[in-house]
Amino acid sequence: SQQGEEDPQALSIQEGENATMNCSYKTSINNLQWYRQNSGRGLVHLILIRSNEREKHSGRLRVTLDTSKKSSSLLITASRAADTASYFCATAQAGTALIFGKGTTLSVSS
Amino acid sequence: NAGVMQNPRHLVRRRGQEARLRCSPMKGHSHVYWYRQLPEEGLKFMVYLQKENIIDESGMPKERFSAEFPKEGPSILRIQQVVRGDSAAYFCASSQDNDGNTIYFGEGSWLTVV
């Protein structure tokens, strides 16, 4: 069964705008990871945030984690057309495989 | 350092044939995971293996599907007597350990059953 659920399912923005995607999950986790997938390609790891962390940055990406609400958000600032892709959150418990949500499809138009 | 290598990238099989998908993990990685992705959907976990052992196969269909990760050579996902519903992208990923560190994905194998 799905563990993470992303919201919204689809998001369309203009270049230069910020994009925010949310992820909710059901059980306790060891860490939460965000991945990007371009059409017809594999998944590229973006960022990992551990359960004892609240916020993490990587370039134009900012991820937050609220374990009390069992939710995470991914913010992409100053978006570019090349950011167009599907974004997935995935959660991990100790010793288990990552469980993915259904993803958010982001379209950035120039 | 080569990434996770999957082959074939694309595979067409007729109903009833067998499909074999191969995955070579990143160098130094002994944990392998297989996922299936249907069109417009997320990745569904299938099986998690560590050299010669199946750790978790809770996502594998009970029939026709099997996976192995031998001491030498790639991990193999085998689908016997394929049906149209098996058409999907199959992704392999690997990690160094299972302590919650990053797992790295291959580019996937796209299976089409005609």
Image (cartoon, coloured by chain):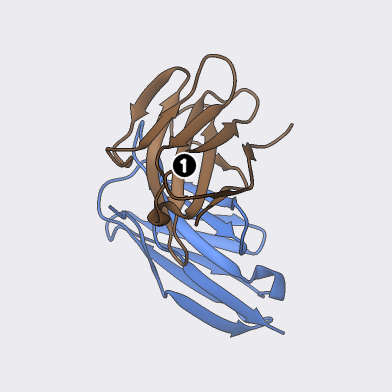
Is A3 positioned to the left or the right of B108 in the image? left
Residue at image point 45% right, 34% down: B78
Chain colored blue: A
Above or below, B56 relative to A49: above
Residue at image point 25% right, 55% down: A26
In the picture, which quadrant includes the N terminus of chain B?
A: top right
Q: Position of residue A40 (x, y in %)?
A: 61, 60
Q: Position of residue A51 (x, y in %)?
A: 38, 45
Asked if residue A5 shows in the view, the reply is: yes
In this view, the residue in front, B27 or A92, is B27
Q: Quadrant of residue A71?
A: bottom left
- Please, which residue is most extreme toward the top here? B71
- Which element carries disc 1, helix, strand or loop? loop
Asked if residue A51 shows in the view, the reply is: no
Residue at image point 40% right, 41% down: B81
Is B10 positioned to the left or the right of B50 in the image? right
Instruction: Look at label 1 and name its amino acid.
Output: Gln
Label 1, residues with CA under 10 Å away: few <14, some 14-19, many ≥20? few
Above or below, A65 relative to A8: above
Residue denoted by label 1:
B17
Chain colored brown: B
Q: Position of residue A81 (x, y in %)?
A: 70, 75
Above or below, A51 relative to A67: above
Is A81 positioned to the left or the right of B97 in the image? right
